[in-house]
Image: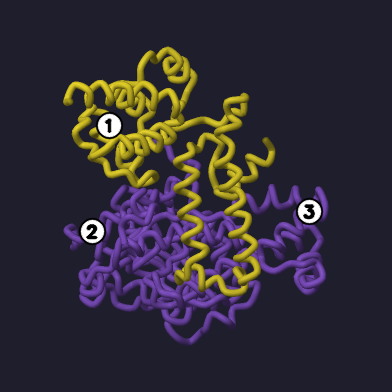
Amino acid sequence: MEEYYNYLDLLELTPEATPADIRRRYRYLKNLYAGDSIEIRALANDFSDEIRADYLARLDDAFKKLSELPEKSTTGAPLPGPGLDDELRLWLTQVDCFTGATLRNIRERMKVDLKTIFTVTRIQTHFLEAIEGEAFQSFPAEVYLRSYLIEYARFLSLDTQRVLNDYLARYRDWTAQQA
Amino acid sequence: MEDTSRHTEIWAVGGGKGGTGKSFITSSMGTCLALKGKKTLLLDADLGGANLHNFFGLISPKRSLTDFFEKRALLQELIVHTGIANLELITGSTGSLDSESINYAQKQRLFRHIRALDADTILIDLGGGTHINTLDTFLLADKMVVVTVPEITAIENMYQFVKSVYYRKLKSIFKAYELNTVVQDTWKNRTVHNIRNLKDLIGYLKQGSDQIRDIFIREMSGFVVHIILNEVRSPKDILIGENLKRACVNFLGLQVVYSGYASYDEAVHKSINNKEAFMLFNRLSPVVKEIRQLTEHIETETGFSVPEDLLDGRIL
């Protein structure tokens, strides 16, 4: 756990940081220090190539380690999902079926907006809206919907398999009706 | 209202490079504070080329800091009104005495008298450069402010300036604890200790002993530099202030707050040449609001929060 704090420290984040925060900060710092901006070039000797390489390696390592953590979190490590407080966690265990409306409800409780999901997953917001509104006709084929759902569920730290099972069942019902 | 224990807060504005708008920012922040009802005094400590009076349309005052140094006048006697309520000014010397010829005793005397002036806030406008007198005046402040612009030369000088200030402070504190040689010796032998920069030096010293670590905690934790970015021309420039902050924290090991920015605006240029107080006559300029904001950030020791879109690189 000590290490975990060191990684967060390197990313200049506090333990409350969500996976999305971590990813954003990592991208920002990586862009800043790997790049060639005037504010970095002006550092000259204080940021030699050697220091730069060393820093970037540590940054990559920290991000990698922090990204690996959510899997471990099921075994008790207190890594918070995006706004996953205890009340919400409890409520999530009681969800019977991950419908579009349920997913929207969860997302809103986590105070995550679609734009934020887009910035990380690169899934266009109209597809995200279609998922939540169950506008099934928006998806050209199941395979697209499936991959979007996986990204969406992962972003909200949900059980991907459960979301797929529940949601795709509804999608298949709909396609059967269309036929 | 009883006001028996007025606490005077001193802000020093520096930055290493000339022409970044230190005087403009200082005069505008001062106006801002004065309009809020704070008794504010501007001290033009640019001893080589004082010109703060121009920002209020005043003619060069007859008496300046030179008269104070040469004991022809008390510091209070140099105060002139700017024409704005609650805002007064002491001008630096224009000519005769250059900043480098002030001796230690004169400097001590000036600092003592500055502290005794009757004001809520004293804003000291420093000249450019990293001369010892400039560094010491900067260190005298309760709030240390640097002004820079999004140009590599200005940024280089700013880094150099904050590093010099920090190093100067470090040396004077270690001297007070009779450890004067520790900092210099460590720095001289930096290759032996594998010290590559100021941050490494700080890390090395802290590891040295518990006593030294305590000194850092006690004496250096209040060392916070406030950055103001002037002449911002694009949304991307706004981010430079944030980047500077990160770089100072990460690679210089300093505590830095990004207090805010002021946009580039022709109105500023015009106002300066017309010798009128910018904050009073340009209510439509975005710079007025920006300066109000950054002044408030410095007052409350809070940082400007950069919009998330910028941090994510979505606005370029």
Circles 2 and 3, Cβ within 8 Å, touching? The answer is no
Chain containing mark 3:
B
Residue receiving disc 3: B207
Kind of residue indicated by mark 2: Pro
User: How far from the left and from the top, in percent, is residue B260?
Assistant: 38, 56
Kind of residue indicated by mark 3: Gln
Residue furthest to the front:
A179
Q: Nearer the viewer, mark 2 or mark 3?
A: 3
Q: Quadrant of the N terminus of chain A?
A: top right
For the point 56% across and 36% down, which residue is it?
A: A15
User: How far from the left and from the top, in percent, is residue B246?
Assistant: 52, 57
Lower sequence index among marks 2 and 3? 3
Q: Nearer the viewer, mark 3 or mark 1?
A: 1
Are labels 3 and 1 on one chain? Answer: no
User: How far from the left and from the top, in percent, is residue A25?
Assistant: 48, 49
What is the distance, in whole Å, between disc 2 and disc 3 at their CAs? Answer: 47 Å
Residue receiving disc 2: B286
Local packing at callout 1 (Cα closer than 10 Å; few below 14, some 14-19, many 20+) is many
The colour with which the image depicts chain B is: purple
For the point 42% across and 54% down, which residue is it?
A: B259
Residue receiving disc 1: A131
Residue B82 or A70: which is nearer the viewer?
A70
What is the distance, in whole Å, between disc 2 and disc 1 at their CAs? Answer: 42 Å
Residue B176 or A160: which is nearer the viewer?
A160
For the point 40% across and 35% down, which residue is it?
A: A150
What is the distance, in whole Å, between disc 3 and disc 1 at their CAs? Answer: 55 Å
User: How far from the left and from the top, in percent, is residue B282?
Assistant: 19, 62
Local packing at callout 2 (Cα closer than 10 Å; few below 14, some 14-19, many 20+) is some
- Answer whether residue B260 is visible to the viewer in this image: yes
Kind of residue indicated by mark 1: Ile
The colour with which the image depicts chain A is: yellow
